[in-house]
Image (cartoon, rainbow, N blue to C red):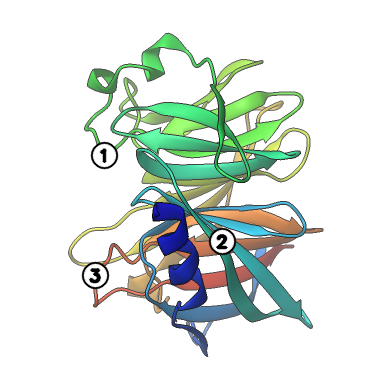
Amino acid sequence: MVKLLLFIFSLTLHAELLEYKITPKNYTPKNVKIIDTKEFKTDLSEFSALAYDGKILYIVSDKGYMYHFKLTLENKKIKSLKLLKTIKLKGDSEGAVCIGKNIAISFERKPKIVLYTKNGTKIKNIKLPKNLNNIKNYQSKNKALESVAYSKKYGFTTAPEKPLFHKKKHTIYTTKKGNFYFKKDGSITAMEFISKNKLLILLRKHNIFSRKSILIELNLKTKKQKTLLTMSSKNGWNIDNFEGLTKIGKNLYLMVSDDNNNPFQKTLFVLFSLI
């Protein structure tokens, strides 16, 4: 009955893509080129993660849903997003990455990374460093495993939204190569491998006066970090609460904001490339 209702809901979803300007007037691409931004007005809410396998865009919601979307680009512009399937998960799902025929999803509150089939059947829990298993080690229940990435060299790669122990550094945990560190600047909300050793990290630094999102490149081999883009409302960036990130083509990435189920916030999709 639940599956039937979800299927009917998929068919009756109200959604539209609207043009949206995110960049300030003085924006000049340096390391990151913003190609297109769309506001997604929909009945769905709280998109927290993206994963793409070349055919389907998988969107994970804070509310514990995984959505299958057909993403259509035209001239490197977001032309359409069509909902194909809705799947109910268990838990506060926050991060996602496609791994062949499967998808790995990270969770908060009960921190874990779970490997699923793309149709939502659980395969197994991924073995993590002991520090990450106990929610009491985190700064709060809502600051656990916000992100997950994967590569053959480093294995499953994740990080708490805020550091467990370090006050000045974030820790990146991998299942094959140990831990890596970089200077703390905001909270980690998403990550994606750019290449064999380079990791693209999305951070959030919000307060009641301003919103800031930052894209950082971290080279896990050389341990060097580079700030690629800082988007701040104080500098004219018209941003929202960016939480999801995925690679969708050669040097082409998609980012999404979580509207927190708040009528004053927006679901934004940002298409960009690295220069």
Compared with residue 9, is residue 75 higher up or lower down, i.e. above or below? below
Residue 146 spot, x, y in % from top left: 42, 40
Mark 1 falls on what kind of element? loop
Q: Position of 138 compared to 102: left or right?
A: left
- Amino acid on which the number 1 mark rests in the picture: Asn
Sequence-first tag of 1 and 2: 2
Query: Residue pushed farthest left?
Result: 208
> In percent of the image, x 28 and y 33: which residue is there?
109
Q: Which residue is mark 2?
A: 85
Asked if labels 2 and 1 touch by Cβ distance under 8 angstroms, the answer is no
Give the quarter of the figure containing the N terminus.
Answer: bottom left
Give the quarter of the figure containing the C terminus.
Answer: bottom right
Residue 264 spot, x, y in % from top left: 24, 77
Residue 160 spot, x, y in % from top left: 39, 32
Asked if labels 3 and 2 touch by Cβ distance under 8 angstroms, the answer is no
**Mark pair 1, 2: CA separation:** 27 Å
Front residue of 76/166: it is 76
Q: Please give the count of numbered marks on the rendered protein.
A: 3
- Amino acid on which the number 3 mark rests in the picture: Asn
Query: Residue pushed farthest front?
Result: 1
> In percent of the image, x 65 and y 64: which residue is there?
32
- Amino acid on which the number 2 mark rests in the picture: Lys
Q: Which residue is mark 3?
A: 262
Q: Quadrant of residue 55?
A: bottom right
Q: Is the residue marked by circle 1 packed among few (<14), some (14-19), or many (20+) residues within 10 Å? A: some
